[in-house]
Image (spheres, grey):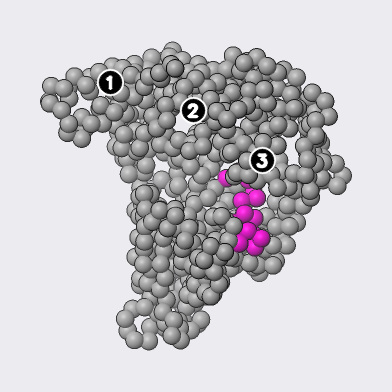
Amino acid sequence: MKRKMISFNVLLILLFVLILSGCGTSASKENSMENAKNSNTNAENKDELVLAFGSEPDDGFDPATGWGRYGSPLFQSTILKRDDDLNIVNDLATNHTISDDKKNWTVELRDDVKFSDGEPLTASDVKFTYDKAAEAGSVVDLNVIDEVRVIDDLTVEFILKEPQSTFANTLIATGIIPEHAYDEDYATNPLGSGPYKFVQWDKGQQLIVEANPEYYDEKPYFKKLTFLFLNEDAAFAAAQAGNVDITYIPAAFSNQEVPGMKLESVQTVDNRGIVFPYVKSGEKTEDGHPIGNDVTADPAIRKAIDMAVDREALIESVLEGHGVPAYTSVDGLPWWNSETVIKDADLEGARKLLEEAGWKDNNGDGVLEKNSLKAEFQLYYLAEDTIRQSLAITVADMLKPLGINIEVKGGSWDVIERNMHSEAILMGWGSHNPAELYDIYGSENAGLDFYNTGFYKNETVDEYFEKALKAESEEKALDYWKKAQWDGETGLSGKGDAPWVWLVNIDHLYLAKENLDIGNQRIHVHGHGWPATDNITDWKWSE
């Protein structure tokens, strides 16, 4: 068996990180740092690129199990895609039509597409992909598909169980895999028709790809990409060493200059917010986990928190100014209702709201009470995430003067999963699919995975969701998505039921070589790193 070798650059970077930590003699420090700096010259005409990202797909690079849903699938093509303005345009498709009853989507494919091994991509590969994804039962939700039919080599028909205006997003997010080359090792050795072809994956260390000579669209400028999977500290050290062309960085590093590199800040819908148990306590899930919380079930508590949180202060203190306030999970997207904005934190207004709802500090301990119930609850966050930790702690401090006592607790996803129906959770979402609103607010999704964890239900909101999903197109569904957020009387936003208090949208920050042009970055989705590659074929060295 051929042994895979870790790249020389990776070894140099790891050594450099050790040196920064104080390991080795002073002579070895100087020599190793010099080697690290010289190992990647980054000449302007260099057609290779080294990228440092922190995240690595746990399940590999198989679209049938979710790969490519947050950024370019690199190796695979999709039937449709979004342009820089988030309009839906063709990729593999040349045309698609929808039947009068909105249940049949017929897609015509390009006739010039080949996989990187030279085999043609046909309608049979499309059917195979969607059948395989449905069989996998993963994050790719294909429950709406009744059947996929091959009409001819370049025509495929999707038959839906019911109309769904958001089905186009499924065609956008699912990369097409080759029937002839799919086996149990596909996730670790993928093959597709995308702009790049797979070369090597050293798990936990690096991914190497090269330009696909068979690619049918505009050829990428860079012939080879090496993705280094480094944590934030190691990635920043790699940038200082001159060993990467672009790296993701947290806001805490944004004020530190690195010679020869510039800061790229990208707008996102990578949001963070607090989801509350919406119902009172007493029930349990099938797994025996408690449901409901008597404090957060009071709308006055949730709405007061939404009014009192100073989002601008969170951005300055936690994100070093690199973010914008969040009011829903879809801010800035075409289906966002801008009427949901709460312009300024209003502590006095929140205090008055609580008092009118019967919450008072009866014993002078600084915590409000209503009958025998005290205004206190637990707020969980993912322990390994420093930004979520800082947001949770800062919000808790902000609400103390209001008389709401929050016990902040870090935990693993397993811990969070056991408590997410009965305590508040600091979580994040963000995608280019309006159906995400339905996923996290629809009553049909109550208690389903990490979706509607608080068991939120509003019949009017559900009716808007149904109309949006059954609309003729994404454009005609926009008004219903917006009304679900706030229709002037009710809605899922803070002006309505406030089952979530959204805090911030986090800017995605990157250090890039000064002459690296990463094109027009569209609004990034959830996840720092891969979303930047959504327009990877536009990247180049500037003149």
Distance from disc 1 to disc 3, alpha carbons, whole Å, reads 48 Å
Circles 1 and 2: CB distance less than 8 Å? no
Q: Provide the residue span drawn in magenta.
A: 431-446
| Most common secondary structure along the magenta stretch | helix
Note whether residue 475 is visible.
no
Residue 118 spot, x, y in % from top left: 65, 14
* Left or right of residue 361, residue 36 in this image: left
Vertical side of 319 occupied by 397: above or below: below
**In which image quadrant can residue 348 be found?**
bottom left
| Residue drawn where x is 62% and y is 16% of the image | 117
- Real-space Cα separation, disc 2 to disc 3, in angstroms: 37 Å
- Dot 3: few (<14), some (14–19), or many (≥20) neighbours within 10 Å? few
- Tag 2 residue: 518
Where residue 445 sits in the image (x, y, percent)? 63, 58
Residue 192 image label = none
Residue type at the position of mark 3: Glu
Q: Are marks 2 and 3 in contact (CB under 8 Å)?
A: no
Q: Which mark is residue 37?
A: 1
Residue at mark 3: 135
**Mark 3 secondary-structure assignment:** helix
Q: Earlier in the sequence, mark 2 or mark 3?
A: 3
Q: CA distance from mark 1 to mark 2?
A: 23 Å
When the figure is inspected, residue 464 is found, relative to residue 369, above or below; the finding is: above
